[in-house]
Amino acid sequence: MLVVPVYNKLIVPYADIYFQTPDFEKLAGRGVALNEKVTLLVLKNPQTREDWTDESFYPIGVSGVVSEISQDGYIGVKTMNRVNVDSAYVNSDHTIDLTLSRRNDIQDLDETASYQKLQALKKEIVQFSEGYQWGAWVKAYAEHISSIGTLAAGVSPWLTISNEERYQILEEDSEAKRTEKLEQILYEYLEVAKVTGEANASQQKEYQDRYREAAIRRQMEYLQKELDEMHPENISDVQKFEKKINESGMNEDAKKEALKVLSRVRQEGQDGQEVGMLYDWLDFVTGLSWKKEEQQFIDLGKAQEILDEDHYGLKKVKQRIIQQIAVMNLRKEQQGSILLFVGAPGTGKTSIGKSIAKALGRKYVRVSLGGVRDEADIRGHRRTYIGAMPGRIMDGISKSGVSNPVMVLDEVDKLGESYNGDPASALLEVLDPEQNNTFTDHYMNVPYDLSNVFFICTANTTDTIPEPLLNRMEVIQFNGYTPEEKLQIAKKHLLPKSMEAMGIPQGQLQADDAVLKRIISDYTMEAGVRGLRKRIDTLCRNAAVKISSDPKATVTVTEGGLREDLDMHPVHHDSVLENPKPGVVTGLAWTQVGGEILYIETLFTRGSGKLILTGKLGDVMKESAQIAVSVVKSMFPEKAQLFEENDLHIHVPEGAVPKDGPSAGITLTTAIASLVTGHAVDSHIAMTGEMSLRGAVTAIGGLPEKLMAAQRAGVTKVFIPKENVEDLKDVQQEVLDRLTIVPVSEASDVLRAVGIPFRPVLEQAG
């Protein structure tokens, strides 16, 4: 039996297939006899006889016989049934030993319909050939063709299909499907010939309408392949981008723009001036995740466990997150407000974003907005600019690799504004649910859907956030931690994590509750736990040095050794005065590191009635001082001469620290009243509240932090505005248990409570 491997030639059963004699005999390895049995194999790759191996052939071939050896240099083979190549062994002399078995067809072909289609095809080919010099030969050849397979094999050298596609036709078991594929490639071949020959005839038949576009596309692919072979350096990138664009799932606007840019890359070639910029753009756009992620059901119990495991306390925050997840479960889509976490540094605003991402089963990405003053940082630069880049939002989406990450926009209160635009206004489109489904980054210049992104913003204060931006968000306050909460955080989170980070084995560093409490009280000055973490890291580094020298050593930290271990002086916290004096009153202030007590000191000196303010006070606090003077003058008209003959000096200690805000109004009023009456106010009493000119005490912010500072400093009673009573529910019970809270609405209420004698103006006049 003669074994003949072939490559890139259509081999089908029950057809007449012709080979050029020299090529056929070279593949066979010898001469050929008439009626000799033949097995035609299909090579996987173009190889010479010397390169054949056992794996060089596809597992299906065709049996046949040599039916013709012509004088004009052709050998004809009449193929019969298909065969399975169970094994193929290439001998040292390059002959092939085969083990074959018959491969049966599924006989589902409608012979009548197939014959009619064959005649129609032959007629089409003959009609197309008319007018060409080889038309008569085609007509004579067509008359002797009796099967679709023979016709397809005859035009095989001119087909633009690959060797793999040729083999896929051979391996089709269904006669009907195999015949349909052959008809398809014949019609495509005919249409390619018509396009190439610039035929003007417009055909209406079903196959012509269906495959004309496919034929043109194949011709374009063929031409592109030729072009790529001329410039092989461009092949991989262009094809890679084309595949990515088609598989990305991007919206129509984005796909249209991407294909347009890819076309420019092809036209300009490697040496084009803009090719580098266009490649960068394509690489960024195709690297984005455009497909909408399906909303997964989230187990609320599991989510609560994750939040509790990663963060101690923060009950209100966790409750709000669980509510958001529940709504998303019911709606099966992204729903809810944009959350704005507001609080002092170190209270867990940013880190809880990671826990939320873990609870949602999503990717986490953080975008820092601190100090951003250019709108292009949000919207990106137009790609025509030199050094153009996408904005921080789309850059974060790109780094996450998904379309629905949890994105923390850190420090939105520190956005700036300059001649380059207002980034806060640009952020409105990002956070507005009505607009962000078509957010357009200037660099991309195509819309991208941000509606599936879970946005979380953080800030230390809302005072510097523009009102339109603040209205887009739901504010959730992160109050400072109480000493007991800090102790639990240190034991459960900070110390174990620090030991793990420093490589300290479990049990080889001992720090009891008393040590941790001393660090919290004497070596930190904050509402959060950032400073506490630094102190614990210092202890762990010291322990690492000792354990590195003696791996079996156990390091025990003591209260007495903290000064040396931490290499720092204890932090000074203001505490109540031992000996109160007239004109000095304890106030409460909110700072970005938490609450602090604030002494207001007043003093009369000989002068001409001037008001002297020191302590680096801001404009709002200066106005509060002027209001306080006016209120005291109206409440104590008999003391008017004191203000006329003396200068009033008001000082707030720690002059190097800027101070501002309206909440010191009642404290200033009480301090001046204490001065003019000579009545000292108990320093264990503190107060906070804004003051109006009519003597009303109005609401303030930061109440939880202020009350914690009062409790820490040894204050026992605090006056707060009545309007802030509702805010007491945000204050930890541990703090409320140690303070007496007195709500007030008028300055007179405070003066009576602290024992400063005065009579209403009307009573004095009577």
Image (cartoon, rainbow, N blue to C red):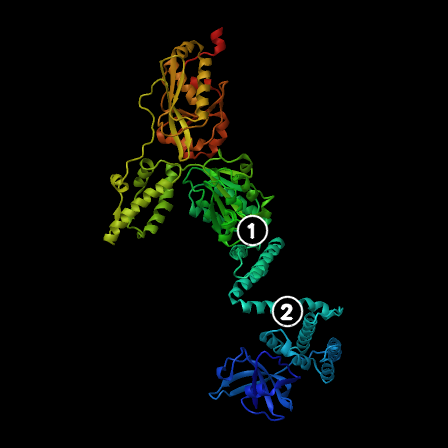
Label 2 is placed on what type of residue?
Gln
Please report contact status of discs 1 and 2: CB closer than 8 Å, yes or no.
no
Residue topped by disc 2: 219
314 or 529, nearer to the observer: 529
Quarter of image, res 268 = bottom right
> What residue do we see at 70% from left, 68% from top?
210
Mark nearest the camera among 1 and 2 is: 2
Label 1 is placed on what type of residue?
Met
In this view, 524 is above or below 70? above
In this view, 134 is above or below 563? below
Q: Is residue 90 left or right of residue 517?
A: right
> What residue do we see at 24% from left, 50% from top?
546
Residue topped by disc 1: 444
SS for dot 2: helix
Question: Is residue 366 at least partly visible in the picture?
Answer: yes
In this view, 680 is above or below 29? above
Per the model, the C-alpha gap separating discs 1 and 2 is: 32 Å
Disc 1 or 2, which lies upstream in sequence?
2
Residue 413 point in image, percent of width and height: 48, 37
Quarter of image, res 337 = top right
Residue 220 point in image, percent of width and height: 63, 67
379 or 260, nearer to the observer: 260
Residue 388 point in image, percent of width and height: 51, 49
Q: Is residue 277 left or right of residue 733?
A: right
Residue 107 point in image, percent of width and height: 68, 80
